[in-house]
């Protein structure tokens, strides 16, 4: 059985930033590249919502279900598949998952009715289930710990940039060649990246990039860990639970707006499909930029005080809530779009700090499982219910009325982060003590 806190959880590794080899950045780029494909396959659907609604006479609830089923599968399967990936091999798992979601996206292009599309979308979710947690675990294992918020925020921003590309390219292709071609293009890109990753990245080449405390210690002790010890490591403190909950709930806002912004622009601004998709992609791009910038800000603020990551997460959530609440209630026009855009910039800003908190509060040996738990919370609390819940409400009070309820999510998330902040220092000191005792 693995001693739970035998590896450092909070300290920086011995490498300086200049010591990071070029191959580490190649792995990072390829891993983010697959994440782009992941979200392109996931979000291309939103660009063709109006076309599917017209083709199959679908309600907003059914349209939302096609989006939410992916996040639901990710949420349900991310933990068990990530645990298997920790044991079977992260690189092999990444290649298998990417191949599955790409083939499932091809299945979407071939669907002839709502039921077939729903099944294909479910398999997209199964393929994507553990990618976020396993991919970020690979990245964090080969970079200095002090870059965690920046790397986590940048990695997760890859989802936003993939969504931008999925909406923009998918909308453009659909406008000229039809929605089936849009799905086909996403599938082809994913399969190409799978082949490149398979030949460029191997477990053997990753080992020398890892700090000695991470790469060598598993050779000194058994890597097997009991389920009880695993769960204890994942939920050992109040603050890590708050990080999971706050991260999940705050993502409901960007997820709802990503899913429904093309339809919002089509219905309330009269934009055609292609232009509505391109316009929505701008808002998604703002979200991605915000994730990178906010993650970097959190790292800079926390250099002198570790609790400032929590304060940053709280500030990002409250800023988003206020701006979206105002933007979604003022009259349609340039000012409305500007205020919503600034709100979207902060809407996923807490992702980087939340990921860093989880990494700091769990041992490196179970980081894939820890990020699987974070992914589970992100999907079940935010990403999965966002589209379908908004669709259900939209069928009753209209899309604009449904979107006006979205700002409550980051407000609730801010409360969760505030509770975590109050417990963080004590929890981190206790974990460091337990780690030192285990090493002795």
Image (cartoon, rainbow, N blue to C red):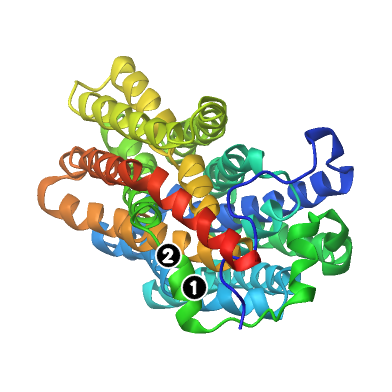
Please, is residue 379 above or below residue 224 in the view? above
SS type, badge 1: helix
From mark 1 to mark 2, how far is it between C-alphas?
A: 7 Å
Q: Position of residue 131 (x, y in %)?
A: 60, 64
In the picture of the structure, the residue carrying the numbered disc 1 is 79
**Mark 2 element type:** helix
> In this orientation, which residue lies closer to the viewer: 112 or 151?
151
Q: Specify whether 398 is left or right of 14.
A: left
Q: 150 and 429: which one is in front?
A: 429
Badge 1 crowding class, 10 Å Cα cut-off, few under 14, some 14 to 19, many 20 or more, is many
Q: Which residue is mark 2?
A: 376
Q: Are marks 1 and 2 in contact (CB under 8 Å)?
A: yes
Which quarter shows the C terminus?
A: bottom right
- Point out the image quarter for the N terminus: bottom right
Mark 1 or 2, nearer chain start? 1
Can residue 255 be seen at all in this image of the molecule? no
- Count of labels in the image: 2
Name the image quarter holding residue 150: top right
- 161 or 435, which is in the foreground? 435
What is the number of the mark on residue 134? Answer: none
Badge 2, how many Cα within 10 Å: few under 14, some, many 20+?
A: many
State which quadrant residue 202 falls in.
Answer: bottom right
Residue 274 position, x and y percent, is: 49, 38
Q: Closest to the observer: 290 or 169?
A: 290
């Amino acid at each position: 059985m693995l001693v739970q806190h035998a590896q450092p959880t909070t300290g920086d590794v011995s490498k300086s930033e200049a010591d990071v080899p070029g191959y580490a950045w190649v792995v990072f780029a390829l891993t983010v590249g697959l994440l782009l494909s992941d979200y392109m396959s996931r979000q291309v659907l939103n660009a063709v919502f109006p076309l599917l609604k017209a083709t199959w006479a679908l309600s907003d609830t059914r349209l939302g279900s096609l989006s939410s089923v992916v996040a639901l599968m990710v949420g349900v399967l991310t933990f068990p598949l990530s645990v298997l990936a920790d044991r079977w091999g992260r690189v092999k798992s990444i290649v298998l998952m990417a191949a599955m979601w790409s083939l499932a996206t091809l299945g979407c292009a071939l669907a002839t009715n709502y039921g077939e599309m729903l099944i294909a979308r479910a398999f997209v979710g199964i393929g994507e289930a553990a990618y976020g947690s396993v991919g970020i675990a690979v990245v964090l294992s080969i970079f200095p710990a002090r870059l965690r918020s920046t790397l986590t925020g940048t990695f997760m921003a890859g989802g936003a940039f993939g969504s931008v590309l999925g909406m923009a390219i998918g909308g453009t292709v659909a406008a000229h060649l039809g929605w089936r071609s849009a799905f086909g293009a996403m599938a082809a890109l994913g399969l190409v990246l799978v082949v490149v990753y398979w030949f460029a990245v191997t477990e053997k080449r990753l080992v020398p990039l890892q700090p000695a405390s991470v790469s060598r210690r598993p050779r000194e002790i058994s890597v097997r860990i009991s389920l009880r010890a695993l769960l204890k490591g994942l939920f050992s403190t109040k603050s890590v639970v708050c990080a999971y909950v706050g991260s999940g709930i705050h993502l409901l806002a960007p997820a709802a707006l990503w899913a429904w912004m093309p339809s919002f622009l089509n219905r309330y601004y009269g934009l055609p499909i292609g232009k509505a998709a391109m316009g929505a992609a701008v808002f998604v791009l703002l979200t991605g930029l915000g994730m990178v910038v906010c993650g970097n800000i959190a790292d800079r603020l926390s250099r002198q005080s570790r609790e400032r990551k929590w304060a940053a997460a709280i500030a990002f959530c409250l800023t988003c809530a206020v701006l979206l609440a105002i933007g979604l209630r003022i009259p349609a026009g340039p000012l409305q779009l500007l205020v919503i855009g600034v709100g979207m910039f902060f809407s996923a800003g807490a992702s980087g700090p939340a990921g860093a908190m989880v990494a700091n509060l769990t041992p490196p040996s179970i980081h894939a499982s820890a990020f699987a738990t974070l992914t589970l919370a992100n999907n079940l609390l935010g990403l999965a219910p966002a589209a379908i819940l908004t669709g259900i409400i939209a069928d009753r009070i209209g899309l604009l009325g449904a979107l006006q309820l979205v700002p409550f999510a980051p407000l609730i998330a801010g409360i969760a982060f505030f509770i975590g902040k109050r417990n963080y220092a004590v929890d981190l000191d206790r974990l460091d003590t337990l780690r030192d005792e285990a090493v002795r």
